[in-house]
Image: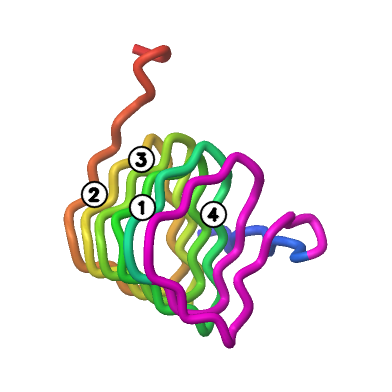
Amino acid sequence: MPEFSIKNFDESEIDTILAEDIDFEGSLSFKDPLMIKGKFKGEIKASGDLYIGEKAKVDAAIEANLVSLKGKVKGDVLAHQQVELFSSSKIDGDITTPNIIMESGSRFNGICKMKQESSEK
């Protein structure tokens, strides 16, 4: 069986980063890539890509184009393109996405629905 891994993302290509010392509560909406490295609680509804760092803790309902997770998420995730779960990730919530990649060691507690975008039906 061939080995594979998810391509690591380059932080320098991400427009906005919520640093490790940020503890934010509220609603986030964005079009360009965003990375969370600290704590976030609330709701994320975005058309851009969301990257969640290894030490991040997110308690939120998430909707984004791509969700790439290395940290912890508590809440449901809707990704229009793809969900990437790195080996350090932990998610407690349901995932809805047309494509999911999970590295060995990632922890996912919930239901996964593989749903295509309406334009692809």
Q: Is residue 14 magenta?
A: yes
Marks 2 and 4 in Cβ contact (< 8 Å): no
Mark before the other along the chain sequence, 1 or 2: 1
Image position, residue 75 (x, y; %): 25, 62
Residue at image mark 3: 97
User: In the rendered structure, which segment of residues is drawn in magenta?
Assistant: 12-40
Mark before the other along the chain sequence, 4 or 3: 4
Marks 3 and 2 in Cβ contact (< 8 Å): yes
Which tag is nearer the camera, tag 2 or tag 4? Answer: 4
Image position, residue 15 (x, y; %): 74, 55
Occupied quadrant, residue 36: bottom right
Image position, residue 89 (x, y; %): 43, 74
Which tag is nearer the camera, tag 1 or tag 2? Answer: 1
Occupied quadrant, residue 85: bottom left
Mark before the other along the chain sequence, 2 or 4: 4
Do we see residue 11 in this rendering?
A: yes
Q: Secondary structure at mark 2?
A: strand
Q: Nearer the viewer, residue 94 or 75?
A: 75
Type of amino acid at the residue the image marks with label 2: Cys
User: What crowding class fits label 2: few (fewer than 14 Cα within 10 Å), some (14-19), or many (20 or more)?
Assistant: some
Residue at image mark 2: 112
Q: Secondary structure at mark 1?
A: strand
Image position, residue 46 (x, y; %): 48, 42
65 lies above or below 22? above
Left or right of 108 on screen, residue 29: right
Do we see residue 106 in this rendering?
A: no
Q: Nearer the viewer, residue 108 or 103?
A: 108
Type of amino acid at the residue the image marks with label 4: Leu
Q: Nearer the viewer, residue 114 or 69?
A: 69
24 lies above or below 66? below
Left or right of 109 on screen, residue 52: right
Residue at image mark 4: 50
